[in-house]
Image (cartoon, helix red, strand yellow):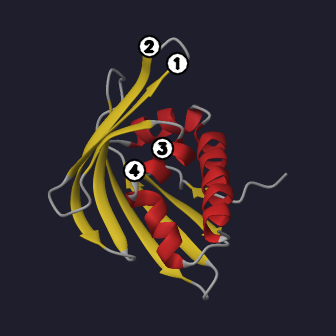
């Protein structure tokens, strides 16, 4: 089955571009990134902090069934324009990956469809390639599929 979330990673560069079209109005797609209860569901993580504003910060944590923390990430929001864009840093704790810079742009296609464009810049091409060697593409596709399903159900209420 073709993956709906597309990842473009040109050779020899330290960035990548992720795009995904959603069968969701722009406002609902944006809410999926800023409302903690929705973020927790589609990302399968706990939102410890999510300050949706310029100079705000965020912190997510994922635990296994026994309550052991297996993933923790945080960052700072550098720019926040409702229904348009979020520019933020992303850092995974206790990993060899340095902080990355993410540009998220939200685009209206029609009344019922929208598009997410993510431009991610890594410290080096090697760090980007290490990330791509993980099941990164599969993971982001699964998360975006959950986002689509979850927010579609919220939209139909």
Frontmost of labels 4 and 1 is 4
Question: Disc 2 and disc 1: Cα gap in Å?
Answer: 5 Å
How many numbered marks appear? 4
In the depicted view, which residue is nearer to us: 153 or 141?
A: 153
Question: Disc 3 and disc 4: Cα gap in Å?
Answer: 6 Å
Please say if the residues under marks 3 and 4 sit with CB atoms less than 8 Å apart: yes
**Direction from residue 68 to residue 109 in the image, left or right:** right
Which label's residue is closer to the chain start, 3 or 1? 3
| Looking at the image, residue 90 lies above or below residue 64 | below
User: Which element carries disc 4, helix, strand or loop?
Assistant: helix
Q: Which residue is mark 1?
A: 64
In the depicted view, which residue is nearer to us: 155 or 104?
A: 155
Question: Disc 3 and disc 2: Cα gap in Å?
Answer: 17 Å
Q: Name the disc covering residue 36, or none.
A: 4
User: Which element carries disc 1, helix, strand or loop?
Assistant: loop
User: Residue 11: percent from the left, percent from the top?
Assistant: 53, 51
Please say if the residues under marks 2 and 1 sit with CB atoms less than 8 Å apart: yes
**Direction from residue 29 to residue 150 in the image, left or right:** right
Q: Which residue is mark 3?
A: 40
Residue occupying image coordinates x 26% and y 60%: 52
In the depicted view, which residue is nearer to us: 109 or 39?
A: 39
Question: Disc 2 and disc 4: Cα gap in Å?
Answer: 21 Å
Question: Disc 3 and disc 1: Cα gap in Å?
Answer: 14 Å
Q: Name the disc covering residue 76, or none.
A: none
**Direction from residue 75 to residue 29 in the image, left or right:** right
């Amino acid at each position: 089955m073709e993956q709906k979330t597309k990842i473009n990673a040109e050779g020899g560069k330290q960035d990548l571009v992720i795009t995904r079209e959603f069968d969701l109005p722009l406002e609902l797609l944006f809410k999926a990134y800023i409302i903690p209860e929705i973020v927790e569901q589609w990302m399968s993580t706990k939102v410890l902090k999510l300050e949706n504003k310029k100079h705000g910060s965020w912190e997510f944590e994922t635990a296994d069934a026994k309550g052991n923390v297996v993933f923790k990430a945080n960052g700072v929001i550098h720019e926040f324009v409702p229904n348009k864009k979020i520019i933020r840093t992303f850092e995974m704790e206790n990993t060899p990956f340095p902080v990355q810079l993410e540009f998220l742009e939200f685009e209206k296609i029609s009344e019922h469809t929208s598009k997410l464009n993510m431009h991610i810049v890594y410290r080096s091409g090697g760090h980007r390639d290490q990330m791509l060697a993980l099941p990164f593409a599969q993971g982001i596709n699964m998360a975006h599929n959950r986002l689509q399903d979850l927010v579609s159900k919220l939209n139909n209420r």
